[in-house]
Every structure is written in structure tokens, then in C-alpha cells.
Image (spheres, rainbow, N blue to C red):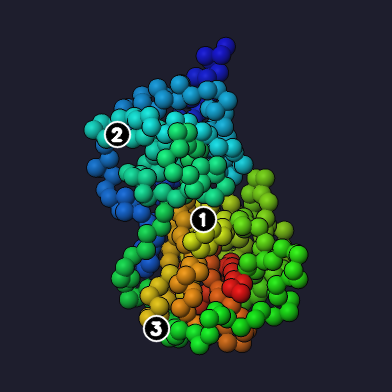
Amino acid sequence: MFRTKRSGLVRRLWRSRAPVEGDGEADRGTHGSSGGCCMGKAAKVAKSNDAGSEAELKALTHSVLKKIKEKQLEVLLQAVESKGGARSPCLLLPSKVDAKVGQQSYSLPMLLYKVFRWPDLRHSSELKRLSCCESYGKINPDLVCCNPHHMSRLCELESPPPPYSRYPMDYLKPPASPYLCSPLPDSLALQESGEPAHWCVVAYWEEKTRVGRLYSVQESSLDIFYDLPQGNGFCLGQLCSDNKSQLVQMVRAKIGYGIQLTREPDGVWVYNRSCYPIFIKSATLDNPDSRTLLVHKVFPGFSIKAFDYDKACSLQRPNDHEFTQQPRTGFTVQISFVKGWGQCYTRQFISSCPCWLEVIFNTR
């Protein structure tokens, strides 16, 4: 009975492995040309170069999984079958056990990440561990978390970006004072001493209409989603919207698990948890001497450092002409779900996008 259950878990896990490119599901929502695409180097390498056959990979994976404790298999299965939607604990396994597929050797964590998240994954440098993970920030531990959904793919910015994907913006100049921006309005001001202060507020928009109230963020990490099992954070599905546009409703339904917004020591990171691309514009993602900003496309499963505090120190708040009638203070990052904007799209401004976010940072 024990062996039967274990074998059943292994079979279910193999059936839930990540699809490879070309089988339909892998292509959904992740393809299409756009300036400023954020992908890892390995994602641009032809799949025909992957070492090892499907049969080899299956045999190796089954062999590895059968050595893992039953409760750990259940944790892995919960994470994989929910596609990261369920809150699964860390899966702590030895980090120095190697597995070989063809001529290529992988550590145990890399093998599981490759099988259950990214078949084109080649090196650990392409990955970023999520801050919710027990192994976050640890260097070379004996046991490392191998939960594939405690990892994200690191977004590599293209440099220099293609000119057609540039978005017009006023010139960014160094500030006259050491403070990054003028004080926030009273409604957004820092709380009195003794109360936790927010580090950003989030506004949700549907085209030119803001939906719901500003969401003040005090915790270091925030999930922003439409439909997320065990979701805890900013649920867009609970907001009352009068927008009857079919496009807005379609995009709203595709937000799904949404994004995770995390404040980390080196800046603010955005992790795309949904099944469709998101699009981001931020002053700190581009050359500070540029007169234009790039709209970056971030694919599902990828993370991008959307706001860099060190870079922000040398910038003055941009005077974005989209919001000349709606004054903003502080630095903002704009994020559109599913639909992009800019010169290579029919939508020139984010205010024409069906569903989007404005993240306003408290830089004081």
C-alpha cells in the first residue's frame, strides 16, 4: 500500500510536468513580438539543443522522486498541481546531489525546476528565489528549498532596446535636493510615530477610470490578484466596477493569480504569477540620461526589479504627460495586465489599457 501510494504520487507529478514549447499549452499567452521583452537567455535558445531525450528525463525524474519522502512528494504535488496558487511549504532537500540528463549534469533543485517549471532552464543564474522561501538569502546551505513555485525566472533587460518600443517621456534631471519627491498628500502621508508606515500605495484602473480605493501597503510583500486560491492581499475581483466593456471583462478574467509585489533590500520586485504577460514602465528600468522610457514585457513566471531605490536617488520625478490632469507625487510604476501600450501597439497610453495598476512609492 505504501509503495502503491508513492508510485501514484510520482505518476501524478510526472503528468503535471511543465509543457515544452510547441505543445500548445506552453505557447499560450507567452509568445508574440514586442519591444522590451524580458526573457532569460536560455529562453531564446533553440529547444533542439536541450540535452537528453524525453525518455531519459522521465526515467531520471521517476528515480529521483521515488527517493523523496512521501510527505515531501505531497508538498511538491500541491505546489505543481495548483501552479503556485496554493500556499505550499518549502521542500528542503540536499543541494549537492547531482543528476545527469544526456551529457548535462544538474543539481537536484535544478532538475525539479526544469521538469516542473522551465524545460529550457540551463543555469541557476537565470533564477530568482522568492522572498517567502526559507532559503531566501542563504548562501550554499546543505538543505535548499526545491519547491519550483518558490522560484521565479529572472528577467533580463535588453540593451540597447529597439527604438520602436520607446515611450516618450520628459527628460529626467538630477534633483536639486537630496529628497526624491515632494511630500505625499495628507491622505497618503506617513503615519504618526509608533504606527507602521506604508512604503507604497496601489491604484487599480480600468481604462481611464480608477476602481476602488487606494490600497496602502505596509507588509514587505503583497499579492495583487483577481482569483487566487488562499489569496491574501489586494483582490481585484472584490472591487465593484461599472465598466461593461467586453475587452475589460475579458482581460479582468485573465488576471488570475496576478502579480506579487515585494520590497527587498535592493529594490521593489514584481513577479508575474499569472498565465499571461504583464507590461511595466518604470523610470529606474532605463538609462537616466534618456528622454524616453521603455515599456517592458514580462512573461509568466518571470520577475523584474521594477523600482531601484539607488537609481531613484539620481532622478527627478518624471512629468508624464498622460497624467497632467491628475497630479501625482513620488515615483510611480505602471503595470498593465495582458495588453501592452506604446508606439508598437494600437494603445499609445496606459490609460487606454483595459486593466492596469499604478504603484506610487513613498520615497521619504
Query: Which amino acid, by three-letter code, is at mark 3?
Result: Arg
State the image coordinates of residue 167 (x, y, percent, origin top left): 42, 78
Q: Quadrant of residue 330?
A: bottom right
Residue 361 drawn above or below residue 149: below
Locate the N terminus and report the quarter of the image it occupies. Answer: top right
Locate the C terminus and report the quarter of the image it occupies. Answer: bottom right
Give the spatial CA distance, label 2 vs label 1: 28 Å
Give the spatial CA distance, label 2 vs label 3: 46 Å
Q: Mark 2 falls on what kind of element?
A: strand
Q: Residue 271: which disc?
A: 1
> Which one is nearer the viewer's eye here, 199 or 208?
199
Residue at left offset 63%, top offset 49%: 228
Left/right of residue 277 with respect to residue 39 in the rendered view:
right
Whether residues under marks 2 and 1 lie with C-beta atoms below 8 angstroms apart, the answer is no
Q: Residue 2: which disc?
A: none
Left/right of residue 195 with respect to residue 18 in the rendered view:
right
Mark positioned earlier in the residue sequence (2 or 3):
2
Q: How crowded is mark 2: few (under 14 residues within 10 Å), some or many (20 or more)?
A: some
Mark positioned earlier in the residue sequence (1 or 3):
1
State the image coordinates of residue 232 (x, y, percent, origin top left): 68, 51
Query: Which amino acid, by three-letter code, is at mark 2?
Result: Ser
Whether residues under marks 2 and 3 lie with C-beta atoms below 8 angstroms apart, the answer is no
Residue at left offset 42%, top offset 46%: 26
Whether residues under marks 1 and 3 lie with C-beta atoms below 8 angstroms apart, the answer is no
Q: Residue 105: which disc?
A: 2
Mark positioned earlier in the residue sequence (2 or 1):
2
> Which one is nearer the viewer's eye here, 261 or 198?
198
Residue pointed to by mark 3:
291
Q: Mark 1 falls on what kind of element?
A: strand
